[in-house]
Every structure is written in C-alpha cells, then in structure tokens.
Image (cartoon, helix red, strand yellow):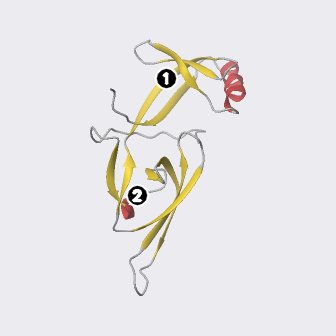
Amino acid sequence: MSDHEDYEFEVKSDEPTYPMQASALRVKGFVLLEGHPCKIKSLNTTDPGKHGDAKVTMVGEDIFTGETFEDTFPTTANVDCPNVKRIEYTLIDVKDNGFLTIMDESGDTRDDLLLRVNCSKKLNLCLQETQSYWCVFSRPWTKKK
C-alpha cells in the first residue's frame, strides 16, 4: 500500500466555491467550514428528530493551516464547497528558510512556496534518500486579477 493518497480534482466553474447538498458530501471531500476551506475528516448524520430535519455534523481540517473546524447542517441544506485544483511538481530543493524549489511539467520552476514549520527537515531527508520526489498540491481555485 502506498504512503500517499491520489485524488483527481477538477474546477467545476469560474467561481471559487460551488453549492452542494450536505448529505452528498463524503470524507476526503472539501467544504467551507466557518469560512475556511477544509478537507472533510469525519461526517456524522443524525436521524430526524420530533421537530426537525436530519442533520450532518462535519469535522474538517483547514488545508492551509491544519486547524480543525466543526459545523452542523441540515442534510437538505446546500453548503459551499471550494473549487480545488490539483497540481503536480518535481521537488528540486528545500531551502533552510522553508521555501521549496519545484518544477512543473513544462520545466518552469518556482521558489515561492513556503512549507509548514515542521516539514522542511523531513522533506530534506526524503530528498536526500531518493533522486526523484513529487510534490502534489491541492489548493482552492481563485480568480486571477
């Protein structure tokens, strides 16, 4: 079994978010919780009560900060989901200040992506152990101005 998970994402429209019925969301999907783009870690659906609808409680991890958020919605409610784009890069170097040097499929490089604090040492070790390393980024789609 692989140490990583592979997902395919597509941009569904020109908008940064799209509506989706809460009952249709799944673990490992993406949703906005308290205004933060989150990867869904757990879902819990309750049965309808005497005076109310069935509800779904979602726990998600912010894809930028790793912070955990939780929210509850009626299962029939539409919730905002971020459009996420998947991008693959070849890792070239990890700088001491935590910035990555990466190369895309067309050979263009960039060095403006900053790692989380604890990742640079681990990634440097991985880079030393193997000759080739791929970085896969999933990010919310945003309009270019």
Where is residue 116 drawn, in percent x and y? Answer: 64, 33
Q: Quadrant of the C terminus?
A: top left
Rendered residue at 42%/18% (across/down): 105
The residue pinned by badge 1 equals 89
Residue closest to the eye, 29 or 35: 35
Type of residue at label 2?
Leu
Where is residue 129 drawn, in percent x and y? Answer: 70, 21
Residues packed near mark 1 inside 10 Å, few (<14), some (14 to 19) or many (20 plus): many
In this view, 134 is above or below 65: above
Disc 2 element? loop
Q: Earlier in the sequence, mark 1 or mark 2?
A: 2
- Name the quadrant containing residue 123: top right
In this view, 106 is above or below 5: above
The residue pinned by badge 2 equals 25
Type of residue at label 1?
Tyr
Rendered residue at 70%/18% (across/down): 96
- Name the quadrant containing residue 49: bottom left
Answer yes or no: do the residues labelled 1 and 2 have beta carbons within 8 Å?
Answer: no
Residue with the most extreme bottom position: 50
Q: CA distance from mark 1 to mark 2?
A: 28 Å
Where is residue 73 drawn, in percent x and y? Answer: 43, 66
Q: Quadrant of the N terminus?
A: top right
